[in-house]
Image: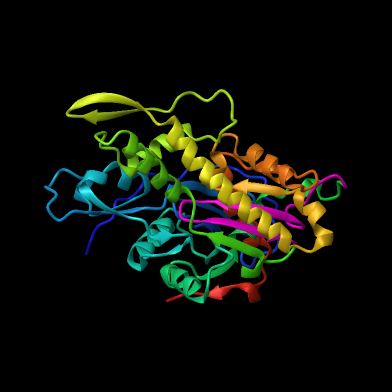
Amino acid sequence: MSKTLAAPAARVVSSAVASSSASATDTLLVGFDWGTNISSVQAARADSTELLVQELIPTVVGYAHDDVLDGILPGDERVFFGKLAQKHRQHVRLVRPLSGGVIADRAAARDFAKHIRSRLPEQSGEIRAVIGMPASSDLQARENARAAVQGLFAKVIFVPEPFLAALGYRDESRLRDSEYQDPVLNSLYVDIGAGSTDVCVVQGRYPTADDQLSAPFAGDAVDQIILDAALAAYPDSGLTLAKVREAKEKHSFVMGEEGHAPALVTVMVAGKPLKIDLTAQIAKGCEALLEKTFEMTRELIARAEPDSIGDLLQNVIVTGGGSLIRGFGVALQTKLLEEGFENPRVRVLGQNYKDHVARGALKTARQAQDRHWQHVIG
């Protein structure tokens, strides 16, 4: 049996999440945003407003190579997760369990789900989890997710991620404010992840596949565009996708964004460090993503009920890793204006975007009735 390396204790924080109905007082509720690149988990007891766990974990599993010598890997463990897997990438086979928001490797997904379960506090009662899924996920995708968590949680609910993001972003203290644009009531979510870009309308109910457009063009595709353009300009640079991704995450921007520094990257050529400028290549990749996102947003707005479009345009919310591209929200809003849409308002969730889905999942867990939960004991 392979061993797994135990991670350090989870961060303990407090939260003002409002409590509502729950079953037993010793039930642990979990909100889980199972992301392609980064996963977010929040947990609290049903009778408490205190968050016991709040973590962001890179969604990656590392399996030690068979020929790794004893003493090279910590504790001579064979399976690593998240940052530890990335840290020891030279001596492990990295596997990303998800692709485009759904499970692509069942074994790795099961191992990762076990790791998430290990991060939760032990207790005597049930552990119930609300898990975010892409709105476009099919029956097979949901069944794969269910199998991955079977026996780890007593009960689960799978909910479309855009709805959870809207619920997590919602400010309940302002619901009676006539000026407040409730994201659960009427919003358009633009979620730019690693494997896919999803644009989804949320209008007070769980969105279906008809409410969403999804395209396999997102962060990974941008990385490839940058790499191809960079290797064309610097054929001997030895650039890799990992190096390009690192540069993109640090320097990404869309044209027109002022004040950005040149994207200088140090590579090793013939054993010597060489600085190369990837500014133009990064701009090319980010601009391609902006154009694709705009096309999808425009198409989904055209599908919406005409009477709802005015309010919908006031609540265009950009989330996901792509939302961290400097100037992206302003550029998307400008494109909508140039297209002739009246007074669009585009907001970007920012660095803590992952917390919104997990927070919305935890809110859903608190509000759920017993008939909503699926049993997954096995």
Residue at 86 percent of width and 49 percent of height:
176
Res. 211 visible in picture: yes
Residue at 23 percent of width and 61 percent of height:
2
In the current view of this chain or complex, which residue is farthest to the front?
232
Relative placement, left or right, of 220 versus 330 is: left
Q: Which residues are magenta?
A: 178-203
Instruction: Report the front residue among 285 and 174.
Output: 285
Percent coordinates x, y for residue 302 in the rendering: 72, 60
Residue at 81 percent of width and 52 percent of height:
311
Instruction: Report the front residue among 308 and 115.
Output: 308
Percent coordinates x, y for residue 8 in the rendering: 37, 44
Relative placement, left or right, of 345 versus 227 is: right
Give the quadrant of residue 36: bottom left
Relative placement, left or right, of 221 versus 24 is: left
Residue at 39 percent of width and 37 percent of height:
246
Figure disc tally: 0
In the current view of this chain or complex, which residue is farthest to the right?
178
Question: How is this picture coloured?
Answer: rainbow
Res. 165 visible in picture: no
Relative placement, left or right, of 140 versus 90 is: right
